[in-house]
Amino acid sequence: MAETFDIAIVGAGITGCAIARQLARFDLSICVIEAANDIALGASKANGGLVHAGYDPAPGTVKAQVNARGCELYGTWAQELGFLFRRTGSMVLGFNDEDRAHLEKLRRNGLANGVPELSTVGPDCIHELEPRASADATCALWCPSTGFVDPFEVAIAALENAVANGVTFMRSAPVEAIEVAASDDKAARFTLATPAGNVRCRYLINAAGNGAADISHMAGAEEFQMVWRQGNIVVLEKELRTLMPLYTVPTPVSKGVIVTGTVHGNTVITATAAVREPGDTQTYASDVNALLTGARKLVPDLDTRRVVRAFAGGRPVIQGTNDFFIGKSTVVPGLFQVAGIQSPGVASAPAIAERMELVMREAGVELHERADWNPIRRAPDDFDRAPLARKEELIESEPAWGQIVCRCETVPEAEIVAAIRRRPGAVSVEGVKRRCRAGMGRCQSGFCQSRVVAILARELGCDPSEVLLEDTGSWLVEGPLKGVR
């Protein structure tokens, strides 16, 4: 028996989660359907986390219409949802007259797109704003509104708030087929077949990232192809002082090499752009070397030997366009498309959600605000960042708060347990890692992984051999260990 909802959202990346949170305020039943076993396992995970200000998209594009607005909304979203967000400002560094001309073009773009307080500055101002920026830079585009987040933290926070407001989350539920029936607005129009059970809905929102073309095809809607524009990213150890985002002059397909701090103090070098086979998440030595070389041009004293992790992911690009596709389907009534959400997808997510609400209203969907809507999500305790008095309070309330599991990031057992018990909670080692950073430090889980596996097995009521590193099939333990059965 299929469960029926008013709205089904396919995809639990940052876009789908933001839309779910936006629509949860209305008197509608909503289900988010995710192919993987957790939130933000696609492009949202393999991401540098920059909240771009909006000067890069060409004026008049959909990107331009949502980027600056999304960046503006992040302050409110961070306050309401309790995720970390730093609005540091950024600079695009120029090194010659040709670069200066390109910076002026970006400045004009930004003004047309509604980006506030953009200005071109010279060497003295560059080094006042970021002392570690290259002394060879002769000019820069200064943008005070740029910031950064952990993109998976934003997605998790948005979906936790949506679930708290009544949204259903289905994980490990790849959509295998979609049946579309003629229907009025009061009856279910779509039936989605998944291994976790069928879902019926009146309205369908396609936010499936790199799988968006498949969902559209299954529904008999617009035909388009996705291009896997792969990006390699390098994470360095934490710095005493967090770097401001520094950009090179962008290329036609990417923003070039970017060096930026993160909300947890690491430095990230992001990202290459190469069209590769769909699903390719391998890191390439040539790409990593290009990142390290580009980073040293921007920040000459950057110690690129202090690499903690290199990883890769694919941007969901629609073949033949470099723009977002957001709107109602012109082929299938009741279907709404949110496809091609590549960079600046993280920055745009709150505004994409806002725009989807408007698109649905214009399509005649009745949206009546619920009296019990609660936009506030209380952030979980972060033991490493907590003041000493709060640490003592937590340990007094539960001794497991004093039992440190991850030494690199100072994550205690109780924080891991809380990450598993949240709704929706972690069901894998990487799911724990994304929620409380256990395993994100210098040793990359070398010391804490076995403890995390044991805690997951206990909390999920399963054998350690059933605990997954990430998605289906990624078991870490097989058979007896050290003679214990």
Image (spheres, rainbow, N blue to C red):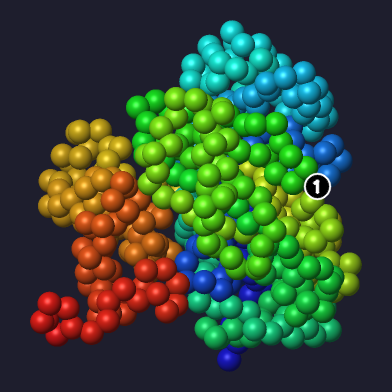
Q: Is the N terminus in the top left, top right, bottom left or bottom right quadrant?
A: bottom right
Image point 65% across, 27% down: which residue? 92
Residue 140: where, in percent of width, then height? 67, 20
Image point 45% across, 77% down: which residue? 472
Reading the image, the residue beneath label 1 is: 62
Which residue is at the far top? 124
Q: Amino acid at mark 1?
A: Val
Inspect this view and state whether residue 254 appears. Answer: yes
Q: Is residue 114 left or right of residue 53?
A: right
The one nearer the camera, 201 or 231, is 231
Q: Is the C terminus in the top left, top right, bottom left or bottom right quadrant?
A: bottom left
Residue 147 vertical placement versus 400 (above, below): above
Inspect this view and state whether residue 372 appears. Answer: no
Residue 457 vertical placement versus 319 (above, below): below
Image point 46% across, 51% down: which residue? 310
Residue 460: where, in percent of width, then height? 30, 74
Residue 421: where, in percent of width, then height? 33, 64
- Tag 1 secondary structure: helix
Image point 60% across, 52% down: which residue? 231
The one nearer the camera, 217 or 5, is 217
The one nearer the camera, 189 or 485, is 485
Residue 110 vertical placement versus 305 (above, below): above
Question: Which corner quadrant of the image does residue 318 belong to?
Answer: bottom right
Residue 476: where, in percent of width, then height? 31, 73
Q: Is residue 415 left or right of residue 170?
A: left
Question: Which corner quadrant of the image does residue 208 belong to?
Answer: bottom right
